[in-house]
Image (spheres, coloured by chain):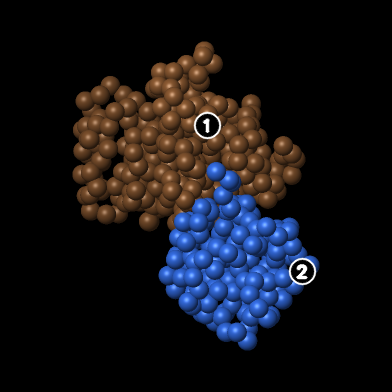
Amino acid sequence: MDLDKAREGSRLGLSQALSLVENGLPFSTEEEGDVIGITGAPGVGKSCLVDQLAQAYARNGEKVAILAVDPSSPISGGALLGDRLRMESADLDDLIYMRSVATRGESGAVPSVVADMVAVLKECGWKRIIIETVGSGQAEFRIAAVADTIMLVEAPGMGDAIQSEKAGIVELVDIIVVNKSDLKGADETAANINSALSAGSKSIPVMQVSSHTGDGITYLVQAIDEVADSGISRAQWQERLASQWMRKMSHHPNLDSILDKLESSQISIKEAILLMEGKE
Amino acid sequence: MATPLRIVIAKPGLDGHDRGAKVVARALRDAGHEVIYTGLRRTPEQIVRTVIDEDAQFLGLSSLSGAHAHLFPRVCKLLQESDVGHVIVFGGGIIPTADRPALFEAGIKAIFGPGTSSNQINDFISTAAAKDDAGCGAESDWHWGD
């Protein structure tokens, strides 16, 4: 793959390289970068928050790339990618690159090609990368496979994920953001989250911001840099491993024939697994 | 499954009517394409930036404000200047018949007005995708319809 144009700053070169990787060409890099994963239920304001963060980095003269993931339809394979709707800064500022990514039939909120797309961005000089997840389901935390820092976004009046004790959240999340701090109830939501967290051993900063007014964004940018050095936890390694495992499965050369055999009851699941491991 | 086409649906200029754009976006999604919707009131420069960043093969422009005669050719010109003349551009909305020849001349390959079925749009997409001279910068006077 020819990355010369993209390395020299051509957006078109970068876009075309990302398409090649998205369509299945493997890519990896030794280049370092800071990858922030943003997750949270639909409607908490993830896209607006990403827009504000990207603008904050651009104001500091820093380049920032955004990968916004939306689900593909399992029936048609098509997808409606609407994140640009709330990220207008992305098509105005040369320091911001934004790309919509469809899940293309992979389960999980972050398709495994995203890791390779991140590698292309790093290789082409985009060191600060924000990934916005689909925003629903346990598989959201597959983001840990690619992100160095994971931010969970909550909003007042919606109930929060921490209280419902979704398994694994606290082990994986680095920062919790209560968005829409300009609305009534934000203090209470933040207090509830803090009290739920106090039962555990890990200390996670809870920040209040408003993507609408821009309040608190500067502090959030600082907090992201402070937690960035905390290293990769065991739970994160587990997600990384799971993601690569999934990829190995979905790209297995005999996947189709094994599925055919399963469908026609020629083999059992146990036998299918042996076949995938090449032991049969 | 074949690689989906990436299609940007955009609303250029000062026009708040996006029902048509959204219906078209859904129809294209249901036909198996990846559709990126820009949202309202985008400038031609923003739309071209979106097409480049998203590496789209098609761009659909929707206008109901009467400014199509200025905005559509401007988008086509900017696409050509940005080395993405391969992108296939189509338009929709309230576009009087008398205005259409100039838009085709500028590089727009199809105009869809009220009453268009989603099948017609999908037929255009698959026909144009199979051609190698349907881009807005191609030296060809081919366009959809008569």
Same chain assignment for discs 1 and 2: no
Up-down: is B45 above or below B4? below
Q: Nearer the viewer, residue B89 or A54?
A: B89
Q: Secondary structure at mark 1?
A: helix
Q: Which chain is blue?
A: B
Up-down: is A4 above or below B78? above
Residue farthest to the bottom?
Answer: B98
Task: Left or right? Give the position of A259 relative to B74.
Answer: left
Q: Chain of mark 1?
A: A
Amino acid under label 2?
Ser
In the picture, residue B142 is in which quadrant? bottom right
Amino acid under label 1?
Asp
How packed is label 2: few (under 14 Cα within 10 Å), some, or many (20 or more)? few
* Residue in view at x 65 percent, y 62 percent: B128
* Residue in view at x 60 percent, y 41 percent: A23
In front: mark 1 or mark 2?
1
Instruction: Name the residue that disc number 1 marks.
Output: A256
Residue farthest to the top?
Answer: A279
Quarter of the image that includes the N terminus of chain A: top right
Q: In this orientation, does residue A81 appear?
A: no
Residue B140, label in figure? 2
* Residue in view at x 54 percent, y 68 percent: B120
Q: Do the CB atoms of the residues marked 1 and 2 lie less than 8 Å apart?
A: no
